[in-house]
Image (cartoon, rainbow, N blue to C red):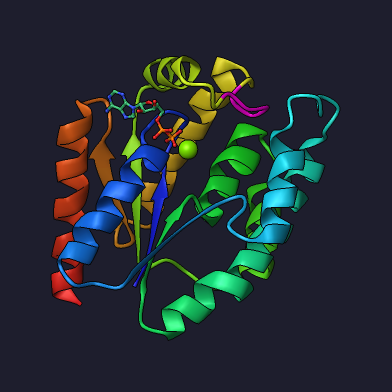
Protein backbone atom coordinates (compact mmCIF):
# COMPACT_ATOMS: atom_id res chain seq x y z
CA UNK A 1 0.00 0.00 0.00
CA UNK A 2 1.18 3.45 -0.97
CA UNK A 3 0.05 6.23 1.38
CA UNK A 4 0.75 9.92 0.84
CA UNK A 5 0.40 12.81 3.28
CA UNK A 6 -0.50 16.16 1.81
CA UNK A 7 -1.38 19.56 3.14
CA UNK A 8 -0.27 23.17 3.49
CA UNK A 9 2.84 24.26 5.37
CA UNK A 10 2.75 23.50 9.07
CA UNK A 11 -0.11 21.04 8.80
CA UNK A 12 2.04 18.40 10.53
CA UNK A 13 3.09 16.01 7.76
CA UNK A 14 6.75 15.75 8.72
CA UNK A 15 6.22 15.58 12.48
CA UNK A 16 3.48 12.92 12.31
CA UNK A 17 5.15 10.42 10.00
CA UNK A 18 7.79 8.97 12.41
CA UNK A 19 5.07 8.21 14.96
CA UNK A 20 2.83 6.62 12.36
CA UNK A 21 5.72 4.46 11.22
CA UNK A 22 6.49 3.34 14.75
CA UNK A 23 2.82 2.59 15.44
CA UNK A 24 2.40 0.51 12.30
CA UNK A 25 5.68 -1.35 12.84
CA UNK A 26 4.54 -2.30 16.33
CA UNK A 27 1.48 -3.78 14.68
CA UNK A 28 3.76 -5.92 12.53
CA UNK A 29 3.61 -4.04 9.25
CA UNK A 30 6.69 -3.41 7.15
CA UNK A 31 6.73 0.34 6.68
CA UNK A 32 9.03 2.60 4.73
CA UNK A 33 8.81 6.39 5.11
CA UNK A 34 10.05 8.77 2.48
CA UNK A 35 9.80 12.43 1.57
CA UNK A 36 9.52 14.77 -1.35
CA UNK A 37 11.36 16.50 -2.76
CA UNK A 38 14.28 14.29 -1.84
CA UNK A 39 14.41 10.76 -0.52
CA UNK A 40 17.27 9.84 -2.85
CA UNK A 41 20.76 11.24 -3.21
CA UNK A 42 19.85 12.97 -6.48
CA UNK A 43 16.52 14.12 -5.06
CA UNK A 44 18.12 15.65 -1.96
CA UNK A 45 20.47 17.64 -4.21
CA UNK A 46 17.48 18.91 -6.19
CA UNK A 47 15.69 19.71 -2.90
CA UNK A 48 18.56 22.04 -1.95
CA UNK A 49 18.12 23.98 -5.19
CA UNK A 50 14.33 24.21 -4.84
CA UNK A 51 14.35 25.29 -1.21
CA UNK A 52 17.40 27.59 -1.28
CA UNK A 53 16.28 31.05 -0.11
CA UNK A 54 18.90 32.58 -2.46
CA UNK A 55 17.12 31.28 -5.58
CA UNK A 56 14.71 34.22 -5.74
CA UNK A 57 14.80 34.32 -9.54
CA UNK A 58 13.41 30.80 -9.97
CA UNK A 59 10.56 30.72 -12.47
CA UNK A 60 7.41 28.69 -11.72
CA UNK A 61 8.10 26.36 -14.68
CA UNK A 62 11.67 25.76 -13.50
CA UNK A 63 10.36 24.94 -10.04
CA UNK A 64 7.72 22.62 -11.49
CA UNK A 65 10.27 20.70 -13.56
CA UNK A 66 12.79 20.35 -10.74
CA UNK A 67 10.11 18.71 -8.61
CA UNK A 68 9.33 16.27 -11.39
CA UNK A 69 12.99 15.31 -11.79
CA UNK A 70 13.30 14.49 -8.10
CA UNK A 71 10.00 12.63 -8.22
CA UNK A 72 10.91 10.44 -11.19
CA UNK A 73 14.03 9.36 -9.31
CA UNK A 74 12.31 8.49 -6.05
CA UNK A 75 9.54 6.56 -7.81
CA UNK A 76 12.04 4.39 -9.67
CA UNK A 77 14.76 4.09 -7.03
CA UNK A 78 12.71 3.82 -3.86
CA UNK A 79 8.92 3.71 -4.02
CA UNK A 80 8.34 1.09 -6.72
CA UNK A 81 10.95 -1.36 -5.37
CA UNK A 82 9.62 -1.08 -1.80
CA UNK A 83 6.05 -1.58 -2.92
CA UNK A 84 7.18 -4.59 -4.94
CA UNK A 85 8.71 -6.00 -1.73
CA UNK A 86 5.31 -5.69 -0.05
CA UNK A 87 6.10 -2.73 2.20
CA UNK A 88 3.75 0.09 3.10
CA UNK A 89 5.32 3.25 1.75
CA UNK A 90 4.34 6.50 3.48
CA UNK A 91 5.43 9.61 1.64
CA UNK A 92 5.66 13.12 3.04
CA UNK A 93 4.15 14.78 -0.08
CA UNK A 94 3.80 13.34 -3.59
CA UNK A 95 2.44 14.54 -6.93
CA UNK A 96 -0.68 16.16 -5.45
CA UNK A 97 1.69 18.77 -3.99
CA UNK A 98 2.65 19.76 -7.53
CA UNK A 99 -1.00 20.14 -8.56
CA UNK A 100 -1.67 22.18 -5.42
CA UNK A 101 1.47 24.39 -5.37
CA UNK A 102 2.72 24.63 -8.94
CA UNK A 103 -0.79 24.27 -10.42
CA UNK A 104 -3.24 26.10 -8.15
CA UNK A 105 -0.63 28.14 -6.22
CA UNK A 106 1.27 29.50 -9.23
CA UNK A 107 -1.90 29.44 -11.34
CA UNK A 108 -0.34 27.44 -14.14
CA UNK A 109 -2.40 25.44 -16.64
CA UNK A 110 -3.66 22.46 -14.64
CA UNK A 111 -3.86 20.11 -17.61
CA UNK A 112 -0.24 20.76 -18.54
CA UNK A 113 0.87 20.27 -14.94
CA UNK A 114 -1.10 17.02 -14.69
CA UNK A 115 0.56 15.73 -17.86
CA UNK A 116 4.02 16.50 -16.46
CA UNK A 117 3.20 14.80 -13.19
CA UNK A 118 1.97 11.71 -14.99
CA UNK A 119 5.23 11.56 -16.92
CA UNK A 120 7.30 11.94 -13.74
CA UNK A 121 5.47 9.27 -11.76
CA UNK A 122 5.12 6.82 -14.63
CA UNK A 123 1.46 6.76 -13.59
CA UNK A 124 2.06 5.44 -10.05
CA UNK A 125 -0.94 6.47 -7.94
CA UNK A 126 -1.24 6.39 -4.14
CA UNK A 127 -3.80 3.98 -2.69
CA UNK A 128 -4.65 6.49 0.01
CA UNK A 129 -3.95 10.21 0.27
CA UNK A 130 -4.54 12.08 3.50
CA UNK A 131 -5.06 15.81 3.47
CA UNK A 132 -3.91 17.37 6.72
CA UNK A 133 -6.07 20.42 6.42
CA UNK A 134 -5.02 23.49 8.37
CA UNK A 135 -5.86 27.19 8.26
CA UNK A 136 -3.09 28.88 6.30
CA UNK A 137 -2.23 31.40 9.02
CA UNK A 138 -2.13 28.71 11.72
CA UNK A 139 0.17 26.54 9.62
CA UNK A 140 2.57 29.32 8.67
CA UNK A 141 2.80 30.46 12.27
CA UNK A 142 3.77 26.92 13.35
CA UNK A 143 6.34 26.74 10.58
CA UNK A 144 7.92 30.07 11.50
CA UNK A 145 8.48 28.81 15.04
CA UNK A 146 10.87 26.09 14.02
CA UNK A 147 13.77 26.77 11.71
CA UNK A 148 12.41 24.92 8.70
CA UNK A 149 11.56 28.05 6.73
CA UNK A 150 12.29 27.55 3.02
CA UNK A 151 11.88 29.51 -0.22
CA UNK A 152 8.32 28.29 -0.83
CA UNK A 153 7.18 29.07 2.71
CA UNK A 154 8.00 32.69 1.89
CA UNK A 155 5.39 32.89 -0.91
CA UNK A 156 2.47 35.23 -0.18
CA UNK A 157 -0.41 34.26 2.09
CA UNK A 158 -2.65 34.44 -1.02
CA UNK A 159 -0.45 31.82 -2.68
CA UNK A 160 -0.82 29.51 0.31
CA UNK A 161 -4.57 30.12 0.35
CA UNK A 162 -4.81 29.07 -3.30
CA UNK A 163 -2.84 25.94 -2.38
CA UNK A 164 -5.26 25.04 0.38
CA UNK A 165 -8.31 25.74 -1.80
CA UNK A 166 -6.70 23.63 -4.52
CA UNK A 167 -6.30 20.69 -2.19
CA UNK A 168 -9.96 20.92 -1.15
CA UNK A 169 -10.97 20.99 -4.81
CA UNK A 170 -8.85 17.90 -5.49
CA UNK A 171 -10.54 16.05 -2.63
CA UNK A 172 -13.91 16.80 -4.23
CA UNK A 173 -12.73 15.51 -7.60
CA UNK A 174 -11.36 12.22 -6.26
CA UNK A 175 -13.20 11.42 -3.02
CA UNK A 176 -12.36 7.69 -3.07
CA UNK A 177 -8.62 8.29 -2.77
CA UNK A 178 -8.64 11.19 -0.28
CA UNK A 179 -9.41 11.42 3.41
CA UNK A 180 -9.37 14.81 5.13
CA UNK A 181 -8.05 15.06 8.68
CA UNK A 182 -8.56 18.35 10.53
CA UNK A 183 -5.04 19.45 11.47
CA UNK A 184 -6.07 22.58 13.36
CA UNK A 185 -6.58 20.42 16.43
CA UNK A 186 -4.01 19.45 19.05
CA UNK A 187 -1.15 17.35 17.75
CA UNK A 188 -2.16 14.22 19.71
CA UNK A 189 -5.69 14.36 18.39
CA UNK A 190 -4.42 14.67 14.83
CA UNK A 191 -2.06 11.71 15.35
CA UNK A 192 -4.94 9.60 16.68
CA UNK A 193 -7.04 10.58 13.67
CA UNK A 194 -4.28 9.60 11.27
CA UNK A 195 -3.79 6.22 12.96
CA UNK A 196 -7.52 5.49 12.74
CA UNK A 197 -7.75 6.37 9.06
CA UNK A 198 -4.69 4.32 8.08
CA UNK A 199 -5.54 1.27 10.17
CA UNK A 200 -9.08 1.23 8.85
CA UNK A 201 -7.79 1.32 5.27
CA UNK A 202 -5.23 -1.43 5.94
CA UNK A 203 -7.85 -3.68 7.47
CA UNK A 204 -10.06 -3.22 4.41
CA UNK A 205 -7.33 -4.24 1.98
N1 LIG B 1 -1.47 20.01 15.62
C1 LIG B 1 -0.40 20.74 15.94
N2 LIG B 1 -0.44 21.62 16.96
C2 LIG B 1 0.64 22.38 17.27
N3 LIG B 1 1.82 22.32 16.63
C3 LIG B 1 1.92 21.48 15.58
C4 LIG B 1 0.82 20.65 15.19
N4 LIG B 1 1.21 19.92 14.13
C5 LIG B 1 2.48 20.27 13.88
N5 LIG B 1 2.92 21.20 14.75
C6 LIG B 1 4.25 21.83 14.79
O1 LIG B 1 4.33 22.71 13.70
C7 LIG B 1 5.61 22.68 13.11
C8 LIG B 1 5.49 22.30 11.65
O2 LIG B 1 5.01 20.95 11.58
P1 LIG B 1 5.50 19.96 10.45
O3 LIG B 1 5.15 18.58 10.86
O4 LIG B 1 6.92 20.24 10.09
O5 LIG B 1 4.52 20.44 9.27
P2 LIG B 1 4.63 20.18 7.69
O6 LIG B 1 5.65 19.11 7.46
O7 LIG B 1 3.24 19.78 7.31
O8 LIG B 1 4.99 21.52 7.10
C9 LIG B 1 6.43 21.67 13.91
O9 LIG B 1 7.19 22.38 14.85
C10 LIG B 1 5.38 20.83 14.58
O10 LIG B 1 5.81 20.29 15.79
MG1 LIG C 1 7.34 19.15 6.26
Task: Residue at 25% x, 56% y: name it.
Answer: 22
* Residue 70, percent from left and from top: 69, 57
Question: Which quarter of the rendering shows the C terminus?
Answer: bottom left
* Residue 92, percent from left and from top: 45, 50
Quadrant of residue 155 in the image? top right
Q: Main secondary structure of the magenta part?
A: loop
Instruction: Name the foreground residue: 153 vs 164.
Output: 153
* Residue 65, percent from left and from top: 76, 52
Q: How many marks?
A: 0
Instruction: Name the foreground residue: 186 vs 173.
Output: 186
Give left or right: position of 18 versus 165: left
Q: Quadrant of ligand 1?
A: top left
* Residue 157, percent from left and from top: 55, 16
Task: Residue at 61% x, 17% y: name it.
Answer: 156
Instruction: Name the foreground residue: 112 vs 67.
Output: 67
Question: Which quarter of the rendering shows the N terminus?
Answer: bottom left
Task: Residue at 46% x, 77% y: name it.
Answer: 82
Look at the image and give the residue range highlighted in magenta. Answer: 149-153
Quadrant of residue 74 in the image? bottom right
Task: Residue at 45% x, 85% y: name it.
Answer: 84
Residue 122 visible in the shown view: no
Q: Is residue 200 above or below residue 13?
A: below
- Please say whether residue 122 is one of the residues in the magenta stretch: no
- Please say whether residue 150 is one of the residues in the magenta stretch: yes
Give left or right: position of 108 versus 6: right
Q: Is residue 177 above or below residue 96?
A: below
Residue 49 visible in the shown view: yes
Amino acid sequence: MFITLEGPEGSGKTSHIPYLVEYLREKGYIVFPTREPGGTSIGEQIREVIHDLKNVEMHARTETLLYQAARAQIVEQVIQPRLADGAIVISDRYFDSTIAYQGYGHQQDLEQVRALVKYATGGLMPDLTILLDVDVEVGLKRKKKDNEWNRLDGYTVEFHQRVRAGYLEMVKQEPARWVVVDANREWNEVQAGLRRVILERLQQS
